[in-house]
């Protein structure tokens, strides 16, 4: 498994990262441990989780994902072999079970979140600690235009970074990152770090897949390249759409059918379905499954530090990891770009 340097850090991570948000909802603890065992057998050394997981977010299950990872780390004794990333939840009044309805990204919440994650993960340090989503008004999770009328009070980036700096100095986190961020946000984090001697962000974890390539055209790729920030690509299969399983069977079991009322409509837009059908046809014409082509394409992008994959079954996980060995022919890449030109970012 190829490894890449994350940002300007000394972290060398596998180009495939094991996403874990199904642990505790769609996967039992035993199944979670089996996935972790298999991933590490295949050379993956990078695990991504979050304090709010599993998804869908519920008070009854919140934190289970970190607990399952923690029990595996304790059982196997492999903490030193693992690059472990987790995330603090941004403000969301609909999740009052996470430190109250008014939880935010101030020093008190950062400290409490880090301590809770350390306890659940059975570790005394986190390699990469990320802001799951910003405190400020920003179009995310399917919204794709900025609305100044939606402005709201927000914790300043300098304050959040200052709180994270205390955790770095204490040795409980090694590096920091952001998620669901904009080009402005990335640059502002860098500016505040440089102005005030605070930790620089190493990564940005954003949506990136065949139906959502805005990272390439929103100046994010240039900003991240020039500032030494690595993209951690999440949802590379568009929540399962790019496997084409829902095209073949609209009621196929998966997050889009198990929790249909909770997912962003971006994953079921007509243009997403039309684009998915053409990507699936291109893959099959070239002897690949739709999932393998979508992942191989994402794995090969020069600006992707690591691609976060998730699965509920070991056979799915195997297929996803196997795609890391595929090299897409030039004509397939050209075919992908032609479809993208026809259906530009319908899943953004």
Image (cartoon, rainbow, N blue to C red):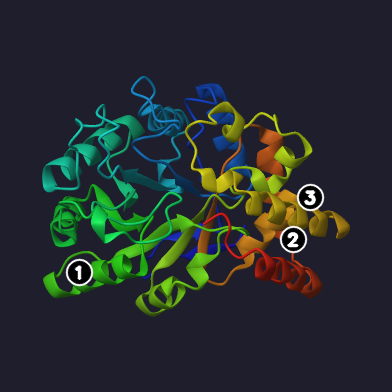
Q: Nearer the viewer, residue 253 or 25?
A: 253
Q: How far apart in space, not on screen, are marks 3 and 1 (Cα)?
A: 44 Å
Q: Give the answer, above or below, for where 42 lies relative to 262.
A: below
Mark 3 or mark 1, whichever is nearer to me: 3
Q: Residue at x 19, y 30 (%)?
A: 100
| Residue 335 shows in the view | yes
Q: Residue at x 32, y 30 (%)?
A: 120
Q: Position of residue 321 (x, y in %)?
A: 66, 49
Mark 2 or mark 3, whichever is nearer to me: 3
Left of 161 or right of it: where is 216? right
Query: Circle 1 — which element?
Result: helix
Q: Which mark is residue 326?
A: 2
Residue 340: image quadrant is bottom right
Q: Nearer the viewer, residue 142 or 299?
A: 142
Q: Which mark is residue 289?
A: 3
Query: Circle 2 — which element?
Result: loop
First of labels 3, 1 by sequence position? 1
Q: How far apart in space, not on screen, are marks 1 and 2 (Cα)?
A: 39 Å
Q: Which mark is residue 193?
A: 1
Q: Residue at x 18, y 69 (%)?
A: 192
């Amino acid at each position: 498994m190829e490894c890449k340097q994350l940002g300007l850090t000394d972290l060398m991570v596998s180009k495939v990262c094991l996403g874990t948000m199904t642990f505790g909802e769609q996967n039992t603890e035993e199944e979670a441990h089996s996935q972790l065992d298999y991933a590490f057998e295949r050379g993956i050394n990078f695990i991504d989780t979050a304090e709010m997981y599993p998804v869908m977010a519920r008070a009854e299950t919140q934190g289970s994902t970190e607990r399952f990872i923690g029990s595996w780390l304790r059982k196997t004794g492999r903490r030193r072999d693992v690059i472990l990333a987790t995330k603090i939840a941004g403000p969301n009044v609909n999740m009052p079970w996470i430190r109250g309805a008014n939880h935010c990204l101030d020093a008190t919440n950062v400290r409490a979140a880090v301590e809770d994650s350390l306890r659940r993960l059975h570790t005394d340090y986190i390699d990469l600690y990320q802001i799951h989503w910003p405190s400020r008004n920003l179009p995310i999770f399917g919204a794709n235009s900025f609305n100044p009328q939606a402005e709201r009070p927000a914790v300043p980036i300098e304050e959040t970074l200052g709180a994270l700096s205390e955790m770095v100095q204490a040795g409980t986190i090694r590096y920091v990152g952001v998620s669901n961020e904009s080009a402005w946000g990335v640059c502002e984090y860098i500016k505040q770090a440089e102005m005030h001697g605070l930790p620089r962000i190493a990564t940005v974890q954003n949506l990136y897949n065949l139906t959502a390539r805005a990272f390439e055209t929103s100046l994010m790729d240039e900003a991240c390249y020039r500032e030494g920030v690595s993209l951690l690509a999440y949802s590379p299969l568009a929540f399962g759409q790019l496997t084409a399983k829902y095209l073949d069977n609209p009621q196929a079991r998966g997050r889009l059918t198990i929790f249909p009322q909770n997912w962003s409509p971006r994953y079921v837009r007509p243009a997403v379905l039309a684009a998915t059908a053409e990507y699936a046809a291109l893959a099959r014409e070239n002897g690949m499954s739709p999932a393998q082509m979508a992942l191989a394409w994402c794995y090969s992008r020069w600006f992707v530090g690591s691609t976060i994959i998730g699965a509920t079954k070991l056979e799915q996980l195997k297929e996803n990891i196997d795609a890391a060995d595929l090299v897409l022919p030039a004509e397939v890449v050209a075919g992908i770009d032609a479809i993208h030109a026809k259906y530009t970012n319908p899943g953004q």
